[in-house]
Image: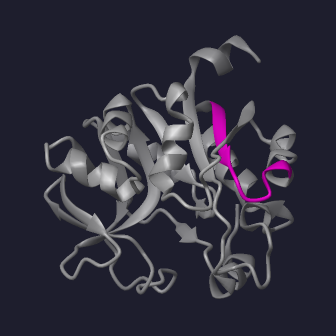
Amino acid sequence: MSSKAQTGRHAIVLAAGAGSRLSDVEPVKPLSRVGGRPLLLHVLDALAAAGAASASVVVGHRAAEVAAVLPDAPIPAKAVSNPRWETAPNGVSVLAAAEAVRPGTFLCMSDHLIDPLLPRRLLAGATAPLALAVDRRLGHPWVDEADVTRVRTDGRQIRAIGKQLKLYDCYDTGLFLIGPDLVAALKAQASPSLSDGVAALAARGLAEAVDIGDARWLDVDDARALALARAKWRH
């Protein structure tokens, strides 16, 4: 690994889940191909273009197959195992890579296609210990309104987050800048989701929302979204 990879900005990508909503058409969701390239590598491409120099990829479901594509990543990427992937929420996957977390670490989902503009705009706007890239374009046709994680803000401050929020003003794009504060918030809970950790920091005024503007992203979580990605996504 180069000295740049050791000292540059790190990224954590969550790729442990079974992807049950897509399993009928793609048995390993992070390896679903869009434009001939696995989703996971698209994510790493975007993060590398925004300055990430190395990555930890948290694996669980069919871990060996996911890890096998990492030599094709644009930056050095290491597989990290989450042995509780089948039973625990995704916050436990973050904790599996906790040793790699430093202030300003990227955190992203392996099934979210993101334009490199997202991480660049997040970097440009982030000031809090946790910053979440949010999309304020409510009703966007690429978003699955029934499944997206919703966010309620007050200016830049995150006030609430969750899939069941009734009052919200933006969407969680699945891209964060995190640091040790999130790790501590997750460790304080028995079996936390990532949203639980964000909510804990938000209650202390330590979590902010950064508007992505017109940057593109797509949560490839089911067959409809995968078909949309294959028809519409361009590098």
Q: Which residues are magenta?
A: 54-64
Residue 9 picture location, percent across and down: 54, 27
Point out the image quarter for the C terminus. Answer: bottom right
Q: Which residue is more in the foreground, 145 or 67?
A: 67
Q: Quadrant of residue 186?
A: top left
In this view, which residue lies farthest toward the top? 3
Above or below 167: residue 30: above
Above or below 64: residue 76: above
Residue 130 picture location, percent across and down: 31, 41
Residue 69 picture location, percent across and down: 85, 48
Q: Is residue 45 visible?
A: yes
Seen in the image, is 215 located left or right of residue 197?
right
Q: Which residue is more in the foreground, 150 or 48?
A: 150
Above or below 203: residue 222: below
Seen in the image, is 211 located left or right of residue 63?
left
Residue 188 lies within the magenta run? no
Q: Quadrant of residue 170?
A: bottom left
Q: Which residue is more in the foreground, 30 or 184?
A: 184
